[in-house]
Amino acid sequence: MFKYSLEPLKPDNDSPEIIKNMCYASNLANVGPMASVAGAIAEILCEKCIGLGFDAGFIENGGDIALFGDRNFKIQIYTKNSPFSDKFFIPLNPAKLFQDKILGICTSSSSIGPSVSFGDSDATTIIANSPAIADAFATSLGNLVKNDEKCLEDVIEFGKKFNVVKGICIIVKDKIGMWNVRLEKF
């Protein structure tokens, strides 16, 4: 049931920490717990890297990224069907945005990758101070996106209501909508 659920689940008290984190993120975003699995794994790996003494780094898994440390990163959003692909990047420095926290930047797409998406976005990218939460909200908000400029605005306005969401970038073909995200040209 856990693997296939499209609805949030409550973890058992004796569940592993990763399952509890996935359930927490999925309950916030109102999606199934597997919507946050890549972000949750990346988050744990970054925590291990920090514990080993690394001062900065990243873990990337198919569009789901965890970053940490006082370093400038350039995050590129790849899209299959958009003129925005390969032309811009999001500059991020986790330490300047969230001090000691791990930064999550995760993308959901209806046109790339094996994940289930009920929306029309080529890329719905979410920034949060938890990769598991960013991953869950990328799926949740991505599911709402339709190929319509007004819809982009509505989804962004809806996403802004969640204090765990720190930035949004949505690309649908030749349309782009953003909140609290800066794009720079390569």
Image: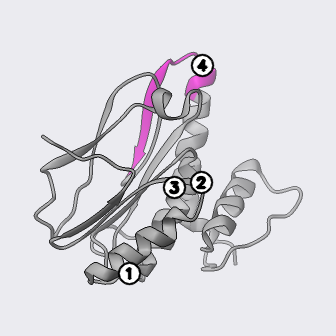
Label 1 environment density (alpha carbons within 10 Å; few <14, some 14–19, many ≥20): many
The residue located at (23%, 56%) in the rendering is: 78
In the image, what residue type sits under mark 1?
A: Gly
Q: Nearer the viewer, mark 2 or mark 3?
A: 2
Question: Which residue corresponds to mark 3?
Answer: 134
Quarter where residue 1 is shown: bottom right
* Mark pair 1, 3: CA separation: 17 Å
State if disc 1 and disc 4 touch (CB < 8 Å). no
N-term mark: 2 or 1: 1
Give the secondary structure at mark 4: loop
State if disc 3 and disc 1 touch (CB < 8 Å). no
The residues colored magenta run 49-61
N-term mark: 3 or 4: 4
Image quadrant containing the C terminus: top left
State if disc 4 and disc 3 touch (CB < 8 Å). no
The residue located at (89%, 58%) in the rendering is: 13
